[in-house]
Amino acid sequence: MTGKIIALVDGSIYSESVCHHVAWIAGRTQAPVELFHVLGRREGGSGDLSGNLRLGARTKIMSELAELDAQRAKLAQAQGRAILDDAKAIIEGDGVAEVALRLRNGDIVETVAEQEADASMVVIGKRGEAADFAKMHLGSNLERIVRAVKAPVFVASRAFKPIERVLIAYDGGVSAMKAVDYVARNALFAGMDCTLVTVGTPSDAVKRGLEDARATLAAGGHKAAVEVVQGAPETALGELVEGKGYDLLVMGAYGHSRIRAMIIGSTTTQMIRTCKVPVVLVK
């Protein structure tokens, strides 16, 4: 892996897991880490309320609103710096020395897109600080980030645990082949136990595709098993992960089968929440 790791942290319960996963990735790949905390535009102020005020009260109220906005912005900045400092301490505590801190204002997806030119991976949590309450927070932006960025996206689970067994979802599409090649070539997966899985009917064409993918992994030093399972991908993959104790799911971000329908659309978050381990999405 070449290039920096972009890690996004907020005040959510997933942030600590993001930090431990980032440290694990950096430790295996020797990639530098850049930690980002993005203050959304909604945190910058209360908006223009002057149209609702009578002329006699406008001057005083507008002054008070401006002061309140300034205080909110100052507190948000301080909170952001504290979150970054805490995150850096966790990563450094895991043995990673090169960690840069970035506090930004604006849209989180635009920020990632602007910063990813020299990035090898983007790491985010499955859900953000206010996923249940604010549409524009990290959790609800997961699909937007996957669509917008070109780098692989590592979606951290709620808690970190050592990763040794990897399940690779394969549907024969271009992005699935890229995911297989990514695992085969990347130092992150060196020495790991890998399994290729297709969700569908075990036809001759499916078996040939799996064997081709297994050959790619073998060229990268991986001895991989293969499986064909039936069912809806968003449930079948999660059940396989949990039932057989895999630690990580790797898949293409876009495909041409039911996995494509799963990734493109509102079921993305549902799939990632169903799977209890981290997920790596590759374009």
Image: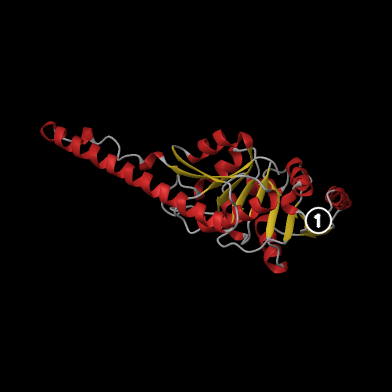
- Indicate the quadrant containing the C terminus: top left, top right, bottom left or bottom right: top right
Q: Place residue 182 in its image quadrant.
A: top right
Residue 35 percent coordinates (x, y): 53, 46
Q: Amino acid at mark 1?
A: Thr
Count of residue discs: 1
When the figure is inspected, residue 121 is found, relative to residue 234, above or below; the finding is above
Asked if residue 226 lies left or right of residue 15, the reply is right
The residue lying toward the viewer, choosing from 207 and 113, is: 113
Query: In this view, which residue lies farthest toward the left?
Result: 56
- Residue under the point 84% across and 47% down: 216
Residue 211 percent coordinates (x, y): 87, 51
In this figure, which colouring scheme has been used for the structure? Answer: secondary structure
Q: Place residue 73 in its image quadrant.
A: top left
Is residue 131 shown to the viewer in this render?
Answer: no
The secondary element bearing badge 1 is classed as loop
What is the crowding at mark 1: few (fewer than 14 residues within 10 Å), some, or many (at least 20)?
Answer: few
- Residue under the point 78% across and 57% down: 191
Asked if residue 128 lies left or right of residue 143, the reply is left
Disc 1: which residue? 201
- Indicate the quadrant containing the N terminus: top left, top right, bottom left or bottom right: top right
Asked if residue 262 lies left or right of residue 108, the reply is right
Residue 162 percent coordinates (x, y): 66, 63
Is residue 81 shown to the viewer in this render?
Answer: yes
The residue lying toward the viewer, choosing from 184 and 243, is: 184
Residue 226 percent coordinates (x, y): 82, 58
Asked if residue 144 lies left or right of residue 208, the reply is left
When the figure is inspected, residue 170 is found, relative to residue 164, above or below; the finding is above
